[in-house]
Structure formats: structure tokens, C-alpha cells
Image: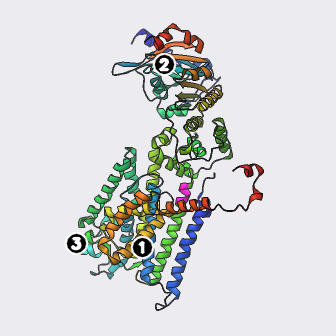
Amino acid sequence: MRDSTFKSAFSDRTAKTFMGVLLGATLVVTLLNQFFPPDSPLHVSAYTVTLLGKYLCYALLALSLDLVWGYCGILSLGHGAFFALGGYAMGMYLMRQIGDRGVYGNPELPDFMVFLNWSELPWYWQGFDQFWFAALMILLVPGLLAFVFGWLAFRSRVTGVYLSIITQALTYALMLAFFRNELGFGGNNGLTDFKELLGFSLQSDSTRVGLLIATSLSLAMAFVLCRWITGSKLGRVVMAVRDAESRARFVGYRTEHYKLWIFTVSAILAGIAGALYVPQVGIINPGEFSPLNSIELVVWVAVGGRATLYGAVIGAILVNYGKTVFTGVMPEAWLFALGGLFVAVTVFLPQGLVGLVSQRWAALRKQFPPKKTNNDTLTPAEGEAP
Amino acid sequence: MSALDNLRDTFRRDQVFDFMRQGTRAVAPGQLDSGSGKNILYLEDITVSFDGFKALNDLTLYIQTGELRCIIGPNGAGKSTMMDVITGKTRPDSGTCFFGQTLDLTAMSETDIAMAGIGRKFQKPTVFPEHTAFENLELAMNGPRGPWHSLFTRLSGEQTNWIEDTLATVGLLEDRHKVAGLLSHGQKQWLEIGMVLMQKPQLLLVDEPIAGMTRQEVERTGELLKSLAGKHSVVVVEHDMEFIRSIASTVTVLHQGSVLAEGTMEQVQNDPKVIEVYLGE
């Protein structure tokens, strides 16, 4: 019974295994891409590198949803909104980096503003030419939206299905707003045609590998952060809120403060995922706000398994790999497959794939109990116990 | 305002004795001061009505420091309403309700009342089912309640000992790492009592503690409640006469919102008014 700290969360076994697998795989992919010529069978193409980077962004997004859904029981059907906002903040920085290399060659205004006959940069685009400012906004904008939204929702004790519906409405409303040209975020087309990030060309292989490494490190750090949160007393309170909210309130916890805290942290993680996603796919448009995206995200977490953190990561990667394969073979069927998957998981695997594996593992352990090798370390009293 | 009200206002319990004990004992506002009286809880002339129905009717009741008091009464006698008034869930229409000498419960919020040292165990046990018995007590432990504090706090050795002592008191030390959802009904009730104890209450309100328990569990619950009296003042609301006889020193019978009889179980059982209420109708 020890409370986790940030340091101990680093060294616990789950986090070590997770980081080992994640960073190891990243390293292998990096080496295979950089040190084998393109005609070698061992070469990993830049396309694959970017695809993996994309999966890891989704994994980070799934991790953030697991934190609120798996641990706090808040089923957010609008988490894609925070992802997209983080993406837009990064996109705005990348737009400003284009400078006069755009189609219209205007050093100050992005192409779509020139096209709309705007004469100067709107106030909310100021500062986005600086990376530090954009980075701050990537954290601040999703966090602030989640804070205000959560403050209103949790204070009014909106829970369950009703909360899910208003989160869905939130992302839908944002999608409609971002579709409008007047809002100044490129309307329907969104932001695209990016050239470089921090001076590195987005088209070069090494930048793509660099982005994969950055994503991988971010995911590892976020995982440790989530392990820390869920292993602390805060995590136990949050789970108590999930299981018996009124009881937690009666014991003296302001449950709305806890929900708000975890919701905001989760939104910030989702924003970071979006910001890492945009330079890798090269575009951000209002489609990212679409309610369907947020629902797909819920399916990833459900498939992987809730309230384990690594389950969400595994689910996100597996489902998206399936999507890549499936949409290549028979694109029309993908949504049916996704829906079927969700139903199947809900009915047959309430604990997700991770739950299935640990169940089978426990059954095996029961059938073939491991030999006791450390009998001599047991005290007599413990030795007597069955 | 009548002359009586004027007089009461002048001699309010929370103010009138202040000048007499100046410098002898300073009690911070919001703190319990039970030292100068033998009673810990004073309910006087409490009336609560719901749509004209008087759930409590001029109820006057005193609970002594450290005693174990049983409250019985037929359905609708006002037992639960009385508990609600003490814990601040229901506000009385008239009357005064003091905890110790200085705390006016009618003017305090539910949370403040809980913080001041009144713990209530509800009829239906509601523990945190996915947490272990140990963690349940940890969550109930009194202390700062903010999210940031919870993130950085670590359980001290002292706190661990305290939790384990409480687990021992309620007889769950062996099952401390068991998930609460897997405990038996009786064990959940004890865990719930333990959770109330972790808030260091001066006064413990226990609502129907033995409902649905086996005979052995009933016996252990009786032992537990008796062992808590002395260190805490305990008020038990219960229907089961046999159980009450086995634990009570003083019994209060409520009927139609006021006290019908008070005394030992023997006295109360032989009281003709009580016999009439319980058997006559």
C-alpha cells in the first residue's frame, strides 16, 4: 500500500514494460528507416514511419479518454474536440511558418485569408508565429475549454447519458463553427500545405522519424503521468466517484472538483495528441471535430479494455491498424465492421482484449499453479496459510 | 415577539455563559465544546412538519457524553426525521438543536456538521465496492479533501496505524485487502461504521445497524457498539427489541414525534403508555 509519486510511477513494472516496448519499437523503426537503403527488404518506408506516428497519436488520445472514462466514469463523446483544438493550434503555427512560400506569396497572411480578401491577420492569430506561444496554446485552449465546460456541467451535476450527449453537442457545435470561413480557420479546407516545423522540412524523412520519436516520448511521458495520477490517492478518489458518487460526496469530497480536475488534465493530453498528429498528416480540418471521430475513439478504448491505460493504447493501435487494412480492401464495409466490433466487445468482452487476456492468464495459472521457489523466505505464519 | 422568546434570545446557550469562563477555556468558533456539560447533544422543543403533518412535535431530548442510547418507536414516530435534523438534512420549523455548548446545528451545513464531529451510518450500507476495505477507510479518513492535496499526499505510518486500528475495531483486519464489494452484508455494515469512525466523530448516529444480519453478526455488532460507547457518544435507532435489550443502558421511546418514555429497558417495557402504543392498537 504505497501512494505513487511521479518518480515511483516511472519505476513501477507496468510503466517500465510499457516504456520498454514503446521506445524499443520506436528505436528499431528509426534504425531500419535510417540505416537500410530503400531497396533493402529490411527498410521501413517513410510512409510506414508516419503511419506509426499517427497510431501513437491516436494511442495518446485513447489514453486521455481512458483517464476520464475508465477511471472516472465520464463517458465523453466529444473528446475529439480537444484533439482537434490542439491540432488547430499546431496548424496555426505551421501556417505562419509558410511565410511567403504560399500560392499568393503574402508573407503575412495565410493563403485562405488572401483568398477571402482579408487585409490583416485577426487578433487571435497573433503570436502563433512563435513556437513557444503555439505550444502554450496547445495546452491552454483545450484545457480551458474543458475547464469551463466541465465547471458548468459538473457543478450542475450533469452525469451519465446526459453528459455524453452534451459533450457530443459540444464537438458538433465546434465542427459547424469551424466550417465557417468567417471564423478565420480556413473553413471547409482547414489548414494545410505546411512547409516546416521549427526549421525542419516536413517532407524530409528525418523530420518524420523525429516526429515519430517525439510522439513516442510524449506517449511514454503521458503514460507515466497517468500511472502516477491513478496510483495516487487522487486516483482512488476518482474511482470512488465513478463507483459511488453520492457516497464520496457524503464522505466529504467535492466530487465536482475531482471530475473537473481529471477532465481538464485529460483534455490537455488530448490536445497534445492533436498537436503531434497535425504535422504528421499534414492537414487539420473541421472533419476532426466530427462526432463520428469521438465515437470511434470510444470504440478503441472499449476494445482495448477500460481502466488499465495500456488497454486503451493497445486498442487504439489495433483498431487503427485494422482500419488501415480494411479500408484498403473494402472501404464501404469499415463502418459496419466498426459498429459490429463495438457491439461484440460490449456484449462478449466488457473488459476488452486486455481483460480477456488476463482472464485466460488467471485460468491458466489456476490450472497449472507455479511452483513455489521461495518457500524459505516465508515466515512460518505465512507458510501455514493456504 | 413574546416575552419568552425575548428571554430565550437573551439567554442563548451559545452566548450566555461566555463571560463566566473568560480566560479559562478558549473555544475557537466552529469547535465542539463539550467539557462544561455532561450532555453532548441538546434537542429542545423541535418541531418539524411536512404539509401539516408533524413528523416531530416538541421533541426534547438530551444525549450524554459517552453514552450508548437506543431510540425505538413505531413507524412514523419521527426517528429518521430526528436523525435528519441532527445531521442538518432537515431544518426544524422551531426549536433549538445544540451540539456541545456552542454549536447551533440548525445554522450549520451538512458538511460543517460532519466536520464538527457528528458521524452518521445510514441504514443501507454504501461502501466503495471496487476499493479494498483498507482503501475505503483511507478515503473516509478526515483531512484535507482537495484534488491537488490528494495527488501529492502519501500515507504516513501514523495514518496507516490508525486505519489498521480501526480495521481491528470493526473486525476486518484480516480482510483488509479484500475488495469491499466481496464482503458479506454484515462486514459491509461494519466497514461503514469504520468509515464513520475515520472521521473522528464525537457523536455517532447509527441507523438500523443489524437489518439483514445473521445471529452471529448481530452479536458482534452489539459488542462493537458497546465498545464504541465511552470513547464516542452513540445513538442507535433500531426496531429489534432483543438486540436493544442486549446493548442498551438507556432507551428512549418516540411516538408521534415526541418522547413517550425514557429509562432502562425494564422501565420502558413496563410503562403502560408504551404498552398501549405497542400492543394496544
Q: Residues within 10 Å of mark 1 (few under 14, many from 20)?
A: some
Q: Is any atom of residue A92 visible in this view?
A: yes
Q: Residue furthest left?
A: A117
The chief SS type of the magenta part is helix
Q: Secondary structure at mark 1?
A: helix
Q: Which residue is mark 1?
A: A321
Judge whether residue A229 is colored magenta: yes
Quadrant placement of the C terminus of chain B: top left
Callout 3: helix, strand or loop? loop
| Front-most of residues B206 and A255 | B206
Residue type, numbered disc 3: Leu
Q: Is residue A234 left or right of residue A156?
A: right
The reply to whether discs 3 and 1 touch (Cβ–Cβ < 8 Å) is no
Does residue B52 lie above or below A251 as drawn?
A: above
Q: Using the image, name the chain to which the residue with label 2 belongs.
A: B
- Residue A293 in view in this figure: no
Which residues are drawn in magenta?
A: A226-230
Q: Please, what is the three-letter code of the amino acid marked with disc 2?
A: Gly
For disc 3, the marked residue is A116
> Tag 1, which chain?
A
Question: Which residue is denoted by mark 2 in the rendering?
Answer: B73
User: Which one is nearer the viewer's eye here, B63 or B6?
Assistant: B63
Is label 3 on the same chain as label 2?
no
Query: Which percent across, then down, holds residue B123?
Result: 49, 31
Tag in front: 3 or 1: 1
Residue drawn at 38 percent across, 76 percent down? A325
**Foreground pick, A242 / A337:** A337
Left or right: A190 with respect to A278?
A: left
